[in-house]
């Protein structure tokens, strides 16, 4: 699962220093447009992170773009994610950022709030976002301004192993009507009717579940102006439900849960075929299916009626440097990557299921069986009406760690759900400076 990468102290300091220097560089720069028409060919730089397979696919897409735009040359810059954001911070500090920058999680907000990213409304003539799902568009906004373009989407889901249900003699749930109480009851029944070590649900709740809990209650993890948008009662209900799942046996015990916090896909209970259900991200389906050797399915979250808590989560974002001298060319590249069928057929779902429904349809037959299930699920979610999603404010990269730590304290009964909620609110407000 990848949602909001957590900044280490070293990376945070590098970022703060870099952005401070970037502000000075911007303040000293001369005026004028950075998007003047040019007579000859231009070269733009495009950065991303990933493995060799992603690099191969991306370079093929770049070649297609250059063939269609002979006056634009794209210079690729990529590497492992471990050093990606450190390098980017250094580049921004030196006023040497790539033109098109791939980002993830809360990074667009971190950089946009310090003036390092281009307001994409300035290049609307070359970048068409009207073909993307509305949720995908909103994911790239910071305080209502469009700074990022979703590379593709995933969504929270309940991954289900039908073989575990069948072995336990428990009927599969109806995800159009089930509630969180139903989820707990079904998970407990699967545990009770399965061999020891097999559970109805692979984990207790996650940080992302808290977001969904809030949204189903008409609240949100963050508001558009960068505040926390949920009340104490919601956080307390989240911790209380997490504890009850563990206490009832529907989910693993506290000690078992902690043991499974940072294991590989193959070592998760779902990956080992020892769980009936697991709340995670839809793009985990392929890896979990491969690990378990089972044909897994995706169900919608419980409690989605009457108020949906789900949202489309961007896997990554394409952004454009505010200091780019070729913003029009950069915008054309981003537009090509998200709206062009040839690019879509090359990249497929490597950066998430495309937010453009026409591209989803174009690549459908090329996808693996699991990829088709993921695409169908995202297509279903994309048609739902749900509340806007706001990128976390500066400092929000620490909140997911706070959630996991306090949830562990609650599971071990070192904190009550009420005290856990109070501590969560205090620490989270301090993290985002609110």
Image: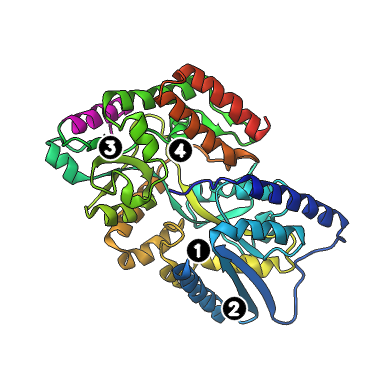
Residue to which mark 4 is pinned:
208
Write down the residue under mark 2: 69
- Where residue 122 sits, quadrant-wise, is bottom right
Disc tally is 4
Closer to the chain start, of discs 1 and 3, is 1
Q: Give the Cα separation between the discs numbered 3 and 2.
A: 46 Å
Q: What secondary structure is found at the residue carrying circle 4?
A: helix
Question: What separation in Å lies between label 1 and label 3 (alpha carbons)?
Answer: 34 Å
Q: Which residue is mark 1?
A: 50
Q: Is residue 180 magenta?
A: yes
Q: The residue tagged with tag 1: helix, strand or loop?
A: loop
Q: Secondary structure at mark 2?
A: loop
- In the picture, measured across the screen, residue 432 lies left or right of residue 22, that is left
**Residue 172: x %, y % from top left:** 19, 38
Q: Is residue 264 left or right of residue 207?
A: left
Q: CA distance from mark 1 to mark 2?
A: 25 Å
User: Residue visible at 33% across and 68% down?
Assistant: 366
**Earlier-in-chain disc, 4 versus 1:** 1
Q: Residue at x 30, y 66 (%)?
A: 365
| Magenta residue span | 174-192
Q: Nearer the viewer, mark 1 or mark 2?
A: 1
Mark nearer the N terminus (1 vs 2): 1
The secondary structure making up most of the magenta span is helix
> Mark 1 touching mark 2, by CB under 8 A?
no
Alpha-carbon neighbours of circle 3 within 10 Å: few (<14), some, or many (≥20)?
some
Q: Residue at x 28, y 37 (%)?
A: 175
- Give percent across and percent down for residue 117: 69, 55
Q: Which residue is mark 3?
A: 175
Q: Residue at x 45, y 18 (%)?
A: 416
Q: CA distance from mark 4 to mark 2?
A: 41 Å
Q: Nearer the viewer, mark 4 or mark 3?
A: 4
- How would you rate the neighbour count of disc 1 (Cα within 10 Å): few for under 14, some for 14-19, many for 20 or more? some
């Amino acid at each position: 699962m990848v949602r909001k990468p957590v900044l280490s102290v070293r990376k945070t300091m590098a970022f703060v220093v870099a952005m401070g220097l970037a502000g000075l560089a911007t303040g000293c720069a001369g005026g004028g447009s950075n998007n003047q028409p040019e007579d000859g060919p231009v070269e733009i730089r495009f950065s991303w992170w990933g493995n060799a397979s992603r690099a191969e696919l991306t370079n093929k897409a770049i070649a297609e773009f250059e063939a269609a735009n002979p006056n634009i040359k794209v210079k690729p810059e990529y590497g492992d994610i471990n050093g990606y954001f450190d390098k980017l911070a250094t580049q921004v500090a030196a006023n040497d950022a790539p033109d098109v920058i791939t980002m993830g999680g809360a990074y667009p907000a971190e950089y946009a709030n310090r003036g390092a990213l281009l307001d994409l409304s300035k290049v609307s003539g070359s970048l068409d976002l009207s073909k993307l799902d509305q949720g995908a568009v909103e994911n790239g906004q910071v305080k209502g301004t469009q700074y990022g373009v979703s590379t593709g989407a995933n969504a929270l889901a309940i991954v289900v192993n039908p073989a575990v249900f069948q072995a336990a003699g428990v009927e599969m749930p109806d995800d159009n009507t089930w509630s969180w109480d139903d989820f707990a009851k079904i998970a407990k029944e699967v545990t009770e009717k399965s061999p020891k070590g097999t559970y109805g649900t692979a984990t207790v709740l996650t940080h992302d579940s808290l977001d969904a809990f809030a949204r189903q209650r008409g609240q949100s993890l963050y508001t558009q102006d960068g505040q926390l948008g949920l009340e104490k009662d919601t956080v307390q209900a989240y911790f209380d439900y997490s504890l009850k799942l563990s206490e009832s046996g529907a989910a693993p015990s506290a000690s078992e849960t902690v043991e499974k916090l940072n294991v590989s896909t193959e070592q998760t209970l779902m990956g080992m075929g020892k769980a009936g259900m697991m709340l995670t991200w839809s793009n985990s389906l392929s890896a979990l299916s491969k690990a378990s050797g089972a044909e897994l399915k995706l169900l919608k979250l419980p409690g989605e009626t009457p108020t949906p808590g789900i949202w489309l989560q961007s896997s990554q974002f394409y952004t454009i440097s505010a200091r780019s001298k070729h913003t029009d060319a950069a915008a054309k590249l981003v537009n090509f990557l998200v709206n062009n069928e040839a690019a879509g057929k090359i990249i497929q779902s490597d950066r998430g299921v495309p937010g453009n429904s026409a591209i989803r349809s174009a690549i459908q037959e090329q996808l693996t069986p699991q990829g088709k299930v993921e695409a169908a699920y995202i297509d279903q979610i994309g048609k739902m009406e749900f509340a806007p999603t706001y990128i976390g404010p500066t400092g929000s990269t620490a909140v997911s760690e706070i959630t996991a730590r306090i949830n562990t304290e609650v599971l071990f009964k070192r904190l009550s759900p009420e005290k856990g909620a109070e501590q969560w609110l205090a620490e989270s407000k301090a993290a985002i400076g609110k």
